[in-house]
């Protein structure tokens, strides 16, 4: 029975069935299934899509669509985890956003989706995010990594501002900074003093894992 | 005096029925009236509320009644004039006229390694001179040709780039609208006695940011017409369907037109789109895709009904990273369909990969593409003289021939197009001359232009005034902590 429920939960994600995902998540809780196992079923499913995307079998609408389905089921399961006094384990916490002066969201959303699928806790601040907003989120969530997306290098001063505030507050060593975006280069990353740069979303995930000492 | 550009002498390519156009129009009005547009600007929200729009201040949402949209579309003139400091580069935008515009890249690219790098100031200035020398370049876009220049702080690159265009070219520039950059564009236009084409770009889906709104209010106070653009990525920031993405794209442009026409009734407007399909593997815009051509044809057909000049913004952008076969076939398809379907402006010369790279050698190759497409749309002339029935009677069958006839001498140059750099040599000659390709011929033309071409300079006073404006820009951004 419990295997069947978990299988249906997994299937709901790979079949992009938002309603089904919520129904099977609730059923899993009702039947007393370990919420950690239910969560694992969801992340297995999204990883399956993520791997298929990496192999060129699935495309972005599949990946982002499945991630959206997941967000319908995870709060139900997370609530149960909380209720049972357990704690969800993440690889790490990442605050992500497109920097001030830039309103491009797609690349940032792809990276956020893949990071979530990989098992990171992702706080997505959206687009046009000022240094001030980034700093607020850093203080609130104490992330392992901040990930900034910038299509245009004109936004460099705002990114430098974050680096210098972090330094001033003695926090620079406590958080890793990664950047990406169409016009961003390794050279640019070095010039503003961040820890890493990658050009594609899947490589961005690998970079995040490297930055927290995993691989 | 006006540069005549190219004139399309036959019916434009149309692929929608009148009923389909009506449906798209109604869908667009419905979106503007029901869904509305988000304006990230208190000033715009208040202004639009005072002028008949329904405004939800909390959610920054503006719902525009259909009558107001149609009224504002009607206020746009069907054509407008752009004055250059050299009368031969004056433009009259609209009707069947097609002008070509040089494009933009953030950086240059090495023609041997294809690695991208930031150009020097001299490379920027040289590229502008090349664009000034090319007859098929009628206008220059914002940030043209490079939006990053070595040694120039990013935020200053825009005014510095405009100053370079003002100094090295008499062709009319379009302004930018990033971080208040239009302030300097407008000032430089005023001191050089030239017009500029203003710029307002929506942020799909259905949003206007403060930069654009500020630009609208600033241009409202000038005599300059405005390039009104939007460009979703189909499946990302707009629906994946052609009809749906046309609806959102047109709604975005129309909301901008409403704002602008309410600020400055009768202002000249050019409707422009840069819709791309999404590359569903990488998330990037699908530069060079056939989907762009379809979108262009639909867009141009619909806006012709509104009687508003149109621009095709995408022919310059390829997915290819190199000057070569893919870059060539993508831009030729997009340029040809844009011209056939009635674009008044086509952004073409110089861009290579997306908005990332530009090279003057590509611009020289594009001079041939623009010339070929321009020749095509000028169509054929059918008169007694071109029919040449009497001449055919005179020449008769073999051994008759036409090569020695005055009719041939008179007409071949008018009827044929002579490319500047295409390789058209017979094989033995091609071998003898070093087996040069079009790209190598373009490199030669590039060197020749730089060695011989001198743009009309600004006066000493004008140069000094430009320098003053740059100084002012430097102080402005320093004060804002952006340097």
Image (cartoon, coloured by chain):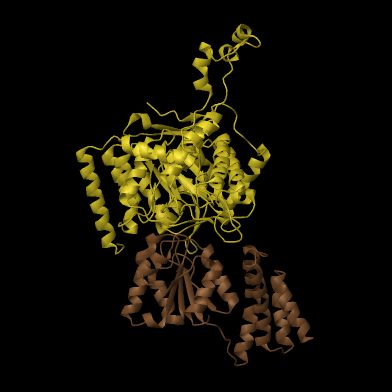
Chain colours: A brown, B yellow
Is residue B19 something that shows in the picture?
A: yes
Image quarter in which the N terminus of chain A is found: bottom right
Q: Point out residue A161 in the picture as x, y percentages from the top left corner.
A: 34, 70
Q: Nearer the viewer, residue A47 or B33?
A: A47
Q: Position of residue A48 (x, y in %)?
A: 67, 73
Q: Residue at x 52, y 55 (%)?
A: B204
- Tell me if B256 is positioned left or right of B126 in this view: right
Q: Nearer the viewer, residue A12 or B131?
A: B131
- The image shows residue B399, relative to residue B317, as above or below, that is above
Q: Is residue B172 visible?
A: no
Residue B164, how many percent across, how many down?
A: 31, 45
Task: Say which residue appears at 26% left-offset and 51% top-offset.
Answer: B470
Above or below for B195 versus B120: above
Total labels drawn: 0
Residue B325: quarter of image: top right
Vertical order, B152 against B265 (above or below): below
Q: Is residue B170 left or right of residue B65?
A: left
Image-quadrant location for residue A99: bottom left
Residue in the foreground of this view, choosing between B263 and B113: B113
Q: Position of residue B223 (x, y in %)?
A: 35, 39
Residue drawn at 35 percent across, 48 percent down? B218
């Amino acid at each position: 029975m419990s295997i069947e429920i978990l299988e249906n939960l997994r299937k709901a994600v790979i079949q992009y069935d938002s309603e089904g995902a919520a129904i099977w998540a609730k059923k899993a809780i009702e039947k007393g299934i370990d919420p950690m196992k239910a969560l694992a079923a969801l992340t297995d499913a999204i990883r399956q899509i993520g791997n298929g995307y990496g192999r060129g079998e699935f495309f972005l609408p599949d990946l982002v669509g499945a991630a959206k389905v997941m967000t319908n089921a995870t709060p139900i399961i997370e609530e149960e985890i909380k209720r049972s006094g357990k704690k969800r384990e993440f690889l790490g916490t990442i605050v992500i956003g497109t920097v001030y002066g830039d309103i491009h969201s797609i690349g940032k959303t792809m990276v956020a989706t893949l990071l979530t699928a990989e098992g990171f806790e992702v706080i997505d601040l959206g687009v046009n995010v000022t240094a001030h907003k980034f700093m607020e989120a850093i203080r609130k969530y104490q992330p392992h990594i901040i990930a900034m997306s910038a299509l245009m290098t004109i936004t460099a001063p705002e990114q430098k501002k974050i680096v210098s505030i972090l330094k001033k507050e003695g926090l620079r060593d406590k958080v890793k900074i990664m950047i990406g975006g169409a016009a961003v280069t390794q050279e640019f990353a070095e010039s503003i003093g961040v820890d890493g740069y990658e050009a594609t979303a899947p490589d961005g995930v690998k970079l995040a894992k490297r930055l927290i000492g995993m691989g | 005096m006006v540069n005549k550009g190219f004139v399309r002498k036959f019916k434009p390519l149309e692929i929608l029925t009148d009923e389909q156009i009506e449906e798209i129009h109604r869908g667009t009005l419905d979106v503007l009236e029901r869904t509305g547009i988000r304006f990230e600007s208190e000033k715009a929200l208040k202004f639009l509320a005072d002028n008949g729009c329904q405004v939800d201040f909390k959610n920054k949402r503006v719902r525009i009644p259909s009558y107001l949209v149609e009224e504002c579309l009607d206020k746009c003139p069907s054509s407008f004039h752009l004055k250059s400091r050299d009368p031969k580069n004056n433009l009259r935008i609209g009707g069947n006229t097609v002008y070509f515009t040089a494009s933009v890249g953030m950086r240059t690219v090495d023609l041997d390694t294809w690695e991208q790098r930031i150009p020097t100031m001299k490379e920027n200035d040289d590229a502008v001179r090349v664009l000034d020398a090319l007859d098929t370049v009628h206008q220059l876009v914002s940030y043209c040709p490079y939006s990053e220049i070595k040694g120039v702080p990013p935020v200053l690159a825009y005014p510095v780039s405009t100053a370079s265009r003002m100094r090295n070219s008499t062709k009319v520039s379009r302004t930018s609208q990033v971080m208040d950059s239009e302030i300097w564009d407008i000032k430089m236009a005023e001191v050089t006695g030239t017009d500029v084409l203003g710029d307002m770009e929506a942020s799909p889906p259905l949003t206007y940011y403060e930069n654009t709104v500020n630009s609208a209010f600033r241009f409202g106070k000038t005599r300059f017409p405005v390039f009104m653009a939007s460009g979703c990525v189909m499946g990302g920031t707009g629906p994946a369907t052609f009809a749906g993405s046309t609806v959102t794209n047109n709604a975005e442009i129309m909301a901008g037109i409403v704002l602008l026409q309410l600020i400055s009734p009768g202002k000249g407007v050019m409707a422009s789109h840069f819709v791309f399909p999404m590359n569903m593997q990488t998330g990037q815009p699908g530069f060079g895709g056939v989907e762009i051509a379809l979108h262009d044809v639909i867009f141009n057909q619909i806006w012709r009904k509104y009687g508003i000049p149109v621009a095709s913004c995408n022919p310059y952008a390829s997915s290819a990273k190199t000057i070569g076969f893919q870059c060539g076939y993508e831009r030729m398809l997009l340029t040809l369909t844009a011209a056939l379907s009635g674009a008044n402006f086509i952004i073409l010369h110089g861009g290579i990969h997306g908005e990332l790279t530009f090279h003057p050698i590509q611009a020289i190759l594009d001079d041939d593409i623009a010339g070929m497409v321009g020749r095509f749309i000028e169509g054929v002339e059918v008169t007694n003289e071109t029919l040449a029935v009497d001449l055919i009677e005179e020449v008769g069958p073999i051994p008759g021939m036409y090569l020695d006839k005055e009719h041939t001498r008179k007409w071949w140059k008018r009827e044929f197009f002579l490319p500047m750099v295409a390789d058209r040599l017979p094989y033995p000659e091609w071998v003898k001359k070093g087996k040069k390709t079009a790209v190598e011929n373009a490199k030669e033309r590039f060197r020749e232009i730089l060695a011989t071409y001198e743009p009309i300079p600004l006066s000493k006073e004008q140069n000094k005034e430009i320098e003053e404006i740059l100084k002012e820009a430097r102080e402005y951004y320093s004060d804002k902590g952006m340097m």
